[in-house]
Image: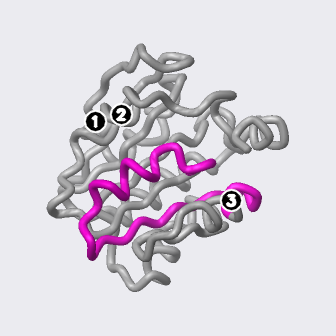
Amino acid sequence: MFLRGFVKHPVMVGSIVPSSPQLIRKMLKPVDWANTKVFVEYGPGVGTFSRAILDQLPSDGLYIAIDTNADFIQYLRHEIVDPRFSAVLGSAADVRQIVADHGAPHADFVLSGLPFSTLPAGVGDAIGQATADVLRPGGAFLVYQFSPKCRDFIEPYLPKIDHAMEWWNVPPAQLYWAWKE
């Protein structure tokens, strides 16, 4: 399914292989799970991060996965049966409305593996602004990329950014944690 998604939509799927377990652990490590009620993921694909998120999300939490690929959304809805999980066909730029439609005032954390460097003009900035707007103070935008260019779409809206690399991934990934102060 993942490979088929890459072949069908190479610009919207950031890699030909799913993220490594090491990347998943490192990316999610700073999340304050005890105080997370709403976790949002942009571009969940086939749910590579989903089990790790659901394993740590509180029982009264909400996990909203947003993707523009209808095949991935259909797959996720079939594969992940958990009352805390909602797969939404839509754009990350509409995250404020999607979170509100789920009855939540904000998101605590937002995760993204979207390939910012290949998004159409203006979309990366729209996602950066919408994410900053939907996050609660103290929350963070967690971004993993293969190019440092994504920082250009995050920093104007969330300037406090921690950065690391994950070498145990194909290809090695840049990791960003952009905190809302």
Under mark 2, the amino acid is Tyr
**What x and y, as percent, mark residue 157?**
37, 49
Question: Which of the two marks, 2 or 3, is nearer to us in this view?
Answer: 3
Say which amino acid is labelled 1. Ile
Q: The N terminus lies in which quarter of the figure? A: top right
What residue lies at 41% left-to-right and 31% top-to-bottom?
A: 21
In magenta, the rendered stretch is 44-73
Q: Residue at x 43, y 16 (%)?
A: 168
Mark 3 sits on what residue?
Answer: 75
Q: Is label 2 in contact with label 3 (beta carbons under 8 Å)?
A: no
Q: Does the magenta run of residues contain 52?
A: yes
The percent coordinates of residue 40 (x first, y second) are 43, 60
Q: Identify the residue at image location x=28%, y=35%.
A: 161
State the image quarter where residue 132 is shown.
Answer: bottom left
Residue wearing tag 1: 161
Density class for disc 2 (Cα within 10 Å; few <14, some 14-19, many ≥20) is many
Q: Which residue position holds label 2? A: 176
- Residue 75 in percent (x, y) is at 68, 59
Q: Secondary structure at mark 3?
A: helix
